[in-house]
């Protein structure tokens, strides 16, 4: 599903309030998930400026916003294919992080390097 404006983005977060809280520091950590979990996340494409510009700078087709249908928590994430078997990485985000274009660009720059460097294997909350 394509999100075409800030208003649509804000409405998405309003329409799907998170049903399960996690620790605030979890928003600064990335975690691995299996392929089935990653593919089960609802995908939204941020299809408006400045997100289309970030995607171009980061050599991506789009900036994805992912949502768990079980908890309604939103994530940024990607499939990391960097010289090994595929691994699926996600990081929880709130509306503040999604609106912070510098943050998103930093996370996705260099093939998601900052997301990858933020992996915390001890993160075990429900997706």
Image (cartoon, grey):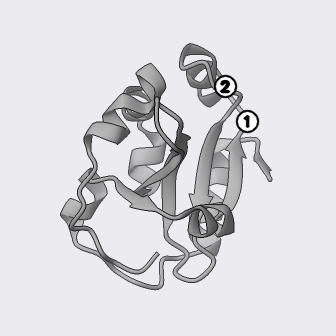
Q: Residue at x 63, y 17 (%)?
A: 56
Residue assigned mark 1: 47
Q: Residue at x 47, y 26 (%)?
A: 111
* Above or below, comparing residue 100 to residue 102 in the picture: below
Q: Quadrant of residue 11?
A: bottom right
The reply, left or right, for residue 124 in relation to residue 34 is left
Is label 2 in a helix, a strand or a loop? Answer: helix
Position of residue 8 measured from the top left corner of the image (x, y, whole percent): 70, 53
Instruction: Check disc 1: other Cα within 10 Å, few if <14, some if 14-19, many if 20+.
Output: some
Position of residue 10 measured from the top left corner of the image (x, y, whole percent): 59, 56
**Marker count (numbered):** 2
Q: Are marks 2 and 1 in contact (CB under 8 Å)?
A: yes
Q: Quadrant of residue 103?
A: top left
* Above or below, comparing residue 101 to residue 86 in the picture: above
Who comes first in sequence, dot 2 or dot 1? 1
Q: CA distance from mark 2 to mark 1?
A: 6 Å
Instruction: Name the mark on residue 52.
Output: 2
Residue placed most toward the observer, 81 or 5: 81
The reply, left or right, for residue 26 in relation to residue 39 is left
Q: Quadrant of residue 37?
A: bottom right
Residue placed most toward the observer, 87 or 120: 87
Is label 1 in a helix, a strand or a loop? Answer: loop
């Amino acid at each position: 599903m394509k999100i075409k404006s800030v208003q649509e983005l804000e409405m998405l977060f309003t329409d799907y309030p998170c049903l399960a809280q996690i620790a605030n520091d979890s928003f600064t950590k990335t975690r691995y998930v299996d392929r089935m979990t990653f593919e089960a996340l609802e995908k939204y494409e941020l299809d408006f400026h400045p997100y289309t510009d970030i995607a171009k700078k980061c050599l991506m087709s789009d900036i994805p916003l992912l949502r768990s249908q079980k908890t309604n928590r939103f994530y940024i994430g990607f499939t990391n294919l960097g010289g090994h078997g595929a691994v699926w990485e996600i990081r929880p985000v709130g509306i503040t992080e999604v609106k912070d274009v510098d943050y998103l660009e930093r996370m996705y720059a260099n093939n998601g390097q900052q997301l990858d460097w933020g992996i915390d294997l001890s993160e075990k909350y429900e997706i």
